[in-house]
Image (tube, helix red, strand yellow):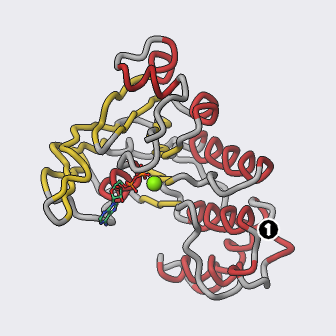
Amino acid sequence: MNEWTRLDVTPIPSLSLSGVGFAHRGQSLLHPVDLRLAGCRRTLVMGPNGAGKSLLMRLAHGLLAPTAGRVHWEGHLPRQAMVFQRPVLLRRSALANLTYALAIAGTPRRRRKPLAREALERFGLAALEARPARVLSGGEQQRLALARAWLARPEVLFLDEPTSALDPAAIKAVEDAVLDFHRRGTRIVMTSHDLNQARRLADDIVLMVGGRLIEHGPAETFFTAPASHEARAFIRGELIW
Ligand SMILES: Nc1ncnc2c1ncn2[C@@H]1O[C@H](COP(=O)(O)OP(=O)(O)O)[C@@H](O)[C@H]1O
Ligand SMILES: [Mg+2]
C-alpha cells in the first residue's frame, strides 16, 4: 500500500540556520542568515531573481556547504526530498526512474514496480510509464519528480521554483500535490517569485532580497502589514532587480 500519512510518527525536527552565509571568490552571495523552521508548515521563500533563494534552499537541504555558520536539525536527520525547477531525471523510462529510486532506498525488488505504478497513477502518469523520462513534457517531468519524492514519504519537502517553467494546468497539478504532501504531514519549504502562488500556499513567508533575509513571518502579516520597505515594494511588484 502506497498511501501514507505521517500523523502517527515523531514530530518533524526543526531546522535551524545560525549565521549561515555563502561566499564565492571573496564575494558574499548570501549574507549571514538566522532562520528556524519548525512544525508541519508551508513556508514560501520569496524574492526577485538573484536574491539568494536557491542558495538558501541548497544550503538548507545540504547540497551546498555554508562558508559561514551552521545548518542544524534539532533531533533526527529527517527524510528529505527536493524538487527543482528543471527536474533531474535519469535517461530511463518514467517507471524506471521510480524503481531506481526505490532500489536506492532499499525497497525489496518485488515491491518496487507495484509501488512505482501506484505513484505514477497518483500523478496521472500511468499511461506514460514506458516513455523515456527525457521526452516527457515539462509538466509531466515535474509530476514524475513529485512522484519520486512521494515514494520517499518525506518529512520535509524542498521545492525550488517548481512551477516557474509550467503552464497553468501543470502549475495547478504541482500546487495540488504540494497541498497533498502537506496534508499527509510533510513540512513544505518552497521558493517562488509569484505572489498569487504564495497567497494560495503559504503559512509563512521568508523574503530574500540581494542575498539577505529581509523578513520571516506569517503569510497573513506579510501581505497585510509587511514590516519592511522591501516587502512593501515586492508586494507592489516594484522589486525586480
Ligand atoms: N555556486 C555559485 N557560485 C557562484 N555564484 C553563485 C552560485 N550560486 C549562485 N550564485 C549567485 O548567487 C546569487 C544568488 O543566486 P540564487 O540563489 O540562484 O538566486 P535566486 O534563486 O533567488 O534567483 C546570484 O547572483 C547567482 O549568480
Ligand atoms: Mg533560484
Q: Position of residue 106 (x, y in %)?
A: 48, 79
Residue in view at x 30 percent, y 36 percent: 213
Quadrant occupied by the C terminus: top left
Determine whether 232 is above or below 92 in the image: above
Residue 17 lies left or right of residue 108; in this view the side is left
Q: Amino acid at mark 1?
A: Leu
Residue in view at x 54 percent, y 52 percent: 161
Residue under numbered circle 1: 125
Residue in view at x 66 percent, y 84 percent: 96
Quadrant occupied by the N terminus: bottom right
Residue in view at x 21 percent, y 45 percent: 31
Residue 124 lies left or right of residue 12; in this view the side is right
Disc 1 C-beta below 8 A from ligand 2: no
Q: Position of residue 53 (x, y in %)?
A: 40, 48
Q: Position of residue 60 (x, y in %)?
A: 32, 53
Q: Quadrant of ligand 2?
A: bottom left
Determine whether 115 is above or below 57 in the image: below
